[in-house]
Structure formats: C-alpha cells, structure tokens
Image (tube, rainbow, N blue to C red):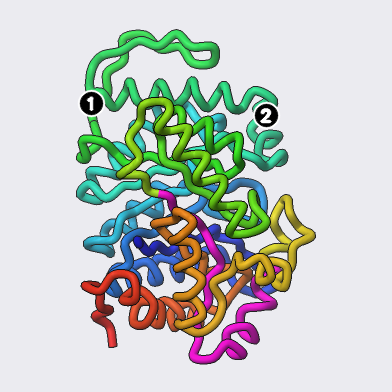
Amino acid sequence: MEFGLFTVFDNYKERLGRSHEELLNEVLEQTSFADGLGYDSVWFAEHHFSEYGILTTPPLLLATAAERTKNIRLGVSIVTLPFKNPIQVAEDYALLDILSNGRVNLGMGSGYLPHEFSGFGVDGKDKAHRFNDALAVIEKAWSGEQFSHDGPYYQFSDVKLEVLPKQKNIPLWIGALSDRGSKYVGKMGYNIMGVPYVASSSIEELKDIIDGYKIARKEAGHETNSVNIPLALHTFVAETREEAERISKEHINLYLDTRQYGRSAKFEDLEAREQLLIGTPDDVIKRIKKYEAAGCNHIMMLMNFGGLPHKEVMKSLKLVANEVMPAFNKNKHAIVS
C-alpha cells in the first residue's frame, strides 16, 4: 500500500480569514513534513474560478515543493487537458520532472465542472474526444522524436521537444471511477484514479468497478500486475474517535457544501458508506484494509479540507505515519518524533 497526501486547495478567505498565500505556504510545509515522515506521494489538484480550488497552475507549486523535498513523488490530480495546449503540458511537466529529479506523477482528465468550461470558452460536449486527441499529442511529444499530428482538435507539424522528462516514462493516470469510464481506460491500458464517494455508494460497489476495469484491461491485452489505483479519501486521525469527529466534521461538511456537484452529501452519509478515514489509527487501519481488499493499493489522504487548521493537519499527518502506515508497510517508520 502506498500513502499519499492530496490537497484540493479549497479556501474560504472571507469566512476563515486565511489568505490564499497562507494556504499555499501551509501546503508546502505539509508536503515537506510528509516527505520527512516517509509518505510516498503528494498530489495537488488544479481548479479555476472558484474558492473550491485556488491552485490554478500545479507545476509552479510542485517545482517549489521539489526544492524542499527529497524522496516524495510529486503528483497532480488532475490536469484538465481540454483546457490546455497539449504541447505546453508536455513541456511543463517534462521540465518539472527534471527539476524534481524524476519524481513526477501525472494524473489527467477531461474535466467535469461546467463553470470551468465556460470560463475557458470550451464546449464540454466533446471533452472526451478532445482529451484523447491531446493525450496522443503528449505521448508523441515525449517520444523525443520530431513528429506531426493531424487530429480533430490539434494539429502540429514537425515539432520536436528540446527538453524531455528525466523518467523514461512518467507514470500516468486518468481520472475515472465510473463503471463505464473505468472500463474504457482499462482498454486503453492506463491506470485509473478518483474519489470513491463521487462514483460509488459502497466499498462493494467500488470493488465491482475496479474488477471490471481490470477485466477490460486484461481483455485488451494489457498486463494487470503493475496496476496502481490511487483513491482519494478524507482523512483525519486522532487519539480517540470522538476527538477525530469533533475536530473534522464541520470542515468536511464545509468542503462538501463547496463542491460544484454532490452537495447533498454530509459527513454522516460518507461515514455510513465507509467513505471516510476518520477516527483512531486502528479505525483507519481497518477501513483501509477494506479498500485494499477491493483493489486499491494507493491511498490519497485528503487531509487539508474545509479550512481544517494547519496544526491539526500536521498532527494527523504524523499520527498516520507513526501508527497507520507501519501496519501496511513493515519497513516504514516515521523519522520525526
């Protein structure tokens, strides 16, 4: 099991009195702390035009994080390709991979928020086709060869990148956790990633989706042994379950109220569906084991949500590293006392 730290960058500066600059600096401190604690990955979300997510350009902040960390892999979840020139995406993340000494994880998707499509002046009706065309360009660009591309949305002639990724193959994920979308990605041979409560109502339903993805992948001739499936779950760990719920509940509900879809969900709904990692270390270990049995092998812990105070995020990060991670990876021990 891999353990990651995921931040959506929802911020409520008027309500909380925390500036965007303060949040960005807090996340950098959390990232550096997670690196020292032995977390495997950190993931930054990209969003636009809303307090739901204020990080518009993840590679800028990830480049800063690269300077402050040594081992943790640096991921984005996700780059919304229909909003981008794919050549620019290929160049930006190739450069980030060099600056981070080959630590980039790249999640990509077609987007889902209507206000973002409207803000960029992009028609969302053809987003899947636009995504596929952009992905084809990125892969050609990273080949290192001069290439041309004549697709339905993007056309390039005789292009060759000067700067290529340090990794031979940057690990790629596609944001998809619906049954239909996951099977489609499986046929393409890519890894999937996503947020369980958005696409499923139980761990059992999630397992069916993951199983279907693996079957589709195998039937298309792709191996399944190296499949890496990161799932994002709200996480807060404390010494007692009462303390964990008392501190985190209002912040989870604020986050849920700010989402651009699925606003009807509340803390109690997600907990009843076992879609939270809230409680003592033992509580969280037991629930993660259920996700592990369902096929998840990479937990993206969404710890900074709904204005949860920085000091509480840091305490939870440390408790997870000291008492949760060793239950899955016996050779991992937090080095910060």
Q: Quadrant of the N terminus?
A: bottom left
Disc 1 + disc 2, Cβ < 8 Å: no
Label 2 sits on a secondary structure element that is: helix
Q: Does 79 sit above or below residue 234?
A: above
> Residue 241: within the magenta?
yes
Q: Nearer the viewer, residue 215 or 31?
A: 215
Image coordinates for residue 203, horizontal then vertical, percent: 58, 59
Q: Exactly how many numbered labels are in the figure?
A: 2
> Residue 206: within the magenta?
no
Q: Does 186 sit above or below residue 228?
A: above
Q: Nearer the viewer, residue 99 or 261?
A: 261
257 vs 120, left or right, is: right
- Does any portion of residue 56 appear in the rendered image? no
Which stretch appears magenta?
A: 229-254
Q: Which mark is residue 124?
A: 2
Image coordinates for residue 51, horizontal then vertical, percent: 65, 57
Name the N-terminal-most of marks 1 and 2: 2
Query: Which quarter of the picture shows residue 337?
Result: bottom left
45 vs 36, left or right, is: right
Query: Which quarter of the picture shows residue 268?
Result: bottom right
Residue at the image point whose x is 52% and y is 71% from the top:
235
Amino acid under label 1? Glu
Query: Mark 1 against mark 2, which lies toward the viewer?
Result: 2
233 vs 292, left or right, is: right
Q: Nearer the viewer, residue 154 or 244?
A: 244
Query: Which quarter of the picture shows residue 41?
Result: bottom left
Image coordinates for residue 20, horizontal then vertical, percent: 55, 63
Amino acid under label 2? Gly
**Residue of label 1:** 162
Image coordinates for residue 21, horizontal then vertical, percent: 51, 64
Residue at the extreme right of the image, as rendered: 264
Q: Nearer the viewer, residue 291 or 34?
A: 291
